[in-house]
Amino acid sequence: MHPRKTELAHNVLQAHRAPLDLRQRRALILCDGKRSLAELTMLLGIDAPGLIAQLQHNGYLHIDQESSAPPATPTPATESKPAVERRRSMVAARIYVLDILALQRNPVAAHLHRQLQATREEADTLNVIGLALAQLPALTSEGYAQRVHARLLEVVPEVHLPALRGDVALPA
């Protein structure tokens, strides 16, 4: 199964004022029709199938099924579970920033997107992510840039938090 965004999801992500929490927004951003449910689970955590099913039920996602198995549906037990501690990884941070930059449709964002795609070393990746965060307020609204920064601080490995908190000053 390869979840992909519906027109409703594209509109909600463009509006930046959707009735979605940050975890749902991240899931929508990552659901590009290329990532499988297994890959999304690696990026989002073990509760990803329930989250994806919920977004599909609400009309934000269409799931391309490779088999005739029905899509996973959230169960009351899944929905009432406390939030699972999210895994932090540079891969998740990198993918998140790549997707955010792709949404901007701006030459500066496109250049940063190519730079980030070309990085291989963790230090280079962190540097380009910092550059992207510094440029984001000029490309979009301050509030959106702050939300992206906050979300990124939730997924980047803790060892890199000081660099992203100190090197990138977003407007208050």
Image (cartoon, rainbow, N blue to C red):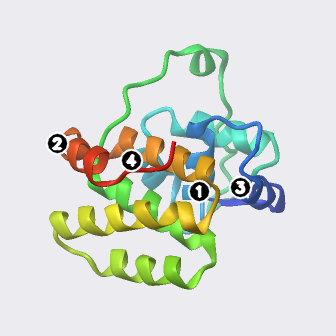
What is the three-letter code of the residue carrying label 4?
Met
What is the three-letter code of the residue carrying label 2?
Val
Mark 2, Cα crowd under 10 Å, few <14 / some 14-19 / many 20+, is few
Residue 10: x percent and y percent? 75, 61
Q: Earlier in the sequence, mark 1 or mark 3?
A: 3
Q: Separation of disc 1 and disc 2 at Cα?
A: 25 Å
What residue is disc 2 on? 159
At mark 2, the secondary structure is helix
Q: Which of marks 3 and 2 is nearer the N terminus?
A: 3
Mark 1, Cα crowd under 10 Å, few <14 / some 14-19 / many 20+, is many
At mark 3, the secondary structure is helix
Q: Separation of disc 1 and disc 3 at Cα?
A: 8 Å
At mark 4, the secondary structure is helix
Q: Earlier in the sequence, mark 1 or mark 4?
A: 1
Q: Separation of disc 1 and disc 4 at Cα?
A: 15 Å
Q: Earlier in the sequence, mark 1 or mark 2?
A: 1
What residue is disc 3 on? 13
